[in-house]
Amino acid sequence: MKNSNVFPLFLFFVILGLELIVLRVVSDFSNPVLGATLIAAAVAIAYLVASAVRIADPWDRAIVLRLGRFHALKGPGLFFIIPIVDTIPYMIDTRVIASSFKAEKTLTKDTVPVDVDAVLFWRAIDPKKAALEVADYMSAISWASQTALRDVIGKTMLSDMLEGREKISGILQGIIDQRTEPWGIAVISVEVKDVLIPTALENAMSMQAQAERERQARVILGDSERQVAEKFGEAALTYTNNPVALHLRAMNMLYEGLKQNSTIVIVPSSAIDSMQLGGMSGLTALAMGAEKTRDGNPTTQTKN
């Protein structure tokens, strides 16, 4: 990353303008050769002075090489170098950088092709290593991230990948950080954005999930029926040991049936004796009581 600061260019023109003013005062440029020589010297001096002054942004660190060897790490702010002798091949950005990477049609451990998208958050903590230990550290980080993602996918089951993205992100962060540490790069975090599976497999998984939900619903319904049957069995035992309770329950059932504007109630003949309703006279009296209830105001009744 090259420094795009325009301050050296501005300084060049300022120095050149001052030199030309001074030369105009001390020399009349009567000799064309001498005038051209003085102008060339003024341009050279202005260029050297302007080249010696550099400014780095707060997030940039300048790699200064002196005669081909590493000399110093400069910045941020104003700093000076020796023109021609010193060079700045790189300006390293030390901010947190987000890089997206992905793996397409990569087989999982159970041989399912998936497409995985992820984001890597990293920063250069050692600009010297980032500039000298690897030719292009940004491309190297991208390739290291992709190969690490493919390795992790190949060792992970599809179900684990769909359910445990945080775990996969942690594994990826450890692998990438280990690979990029010699380059002076620190991995802050890795986030798996999306896991895409084939459409046919997605439909099959949806059908499987639907079948599982139906199975659970049937199991719950069967368990509910079993509990109801158990309660009915307990009630039957209660009525068997307490005929009075059975008689009251029968009377209440008939009363509720007649109360709903019913004129005919069908009761098995065997139930009359088993419920001790007292024959047809008892049923008639019960029906008359229900009729009186309908003629009155049902809402004013109070049940104790």
Image (cartoon, rainbow, N blue to C red):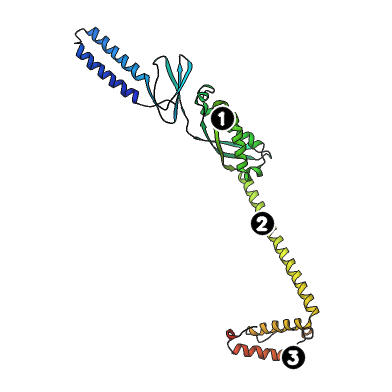
Q: Residues within 10 Å of mark 3 (few under 14, many from 20)?
A: few
Q: Residues within 10 Å of mark 2 (few under 14, many from 20)?
A: few
Farthest right residue in view: 241
Q: Nearer the viewer, residue 290 or 56?
A: 56
> At label 3, which amino acid type do we have?
Met
Residue 23 in sight from this viewpoint = yes
Identify the secondary structure beneath mark 3.
helix
Determine whether, in the image, residue 4 is placed left or right of residue 226: left
Q: Nearer the viewer, residue 35 or 157?
A: 35
Give the quadrant of residue 169: top right
Identify the secondary structure beneath mark 2.
helix
Q: Which mark is residue 280?
A: 3
User: Can you say whether 111 is above or below 302 in the image?
Assistant: above
Quadrant (top left, top right, bottom left, bottom right) of the C terminus:
bottom right
- Give the mark, 2 or 3, whose residue is nearer the N terminus: 2
Identify which residue is drawn at 31% across, 24% down: 10
Give the quadrant of residue 191: top right
> At label 2, which amino acid type do we have?
Arg
Q: Nearer the viewer, residue 174 or 101?
A: 174
Q: Which residue is mark 1?
A: 143
- Disc number lying in front (2 or 1): 1
Residue 197 in sight from this viewpoint = no
Identify which residue is drawn at 35% across, 16% down: 48
Q: Position of residue 75 (x, y in %)?
A: 43, 26
Identify which residue is drawn at 79% across, 80% down: 242
Q: Mark 2 to mark 1: distance in Å? A: 43 Å
Determine whether, in the image, residue 240 is placed left or right of residue 82: right
Quadrant (top left, top right, bottom left, bottom right) of the N terminus:
top left
User: Can you say whether 301 is above or below 61 in the image?
Assistant: below
Q: Which residue is mark 2?
A: 213
- Give the mark, 1 or 3, whose residue is nearer the N terminus: 1
Q: Position of residue 7 (x, y in %)?
A: 34, 25
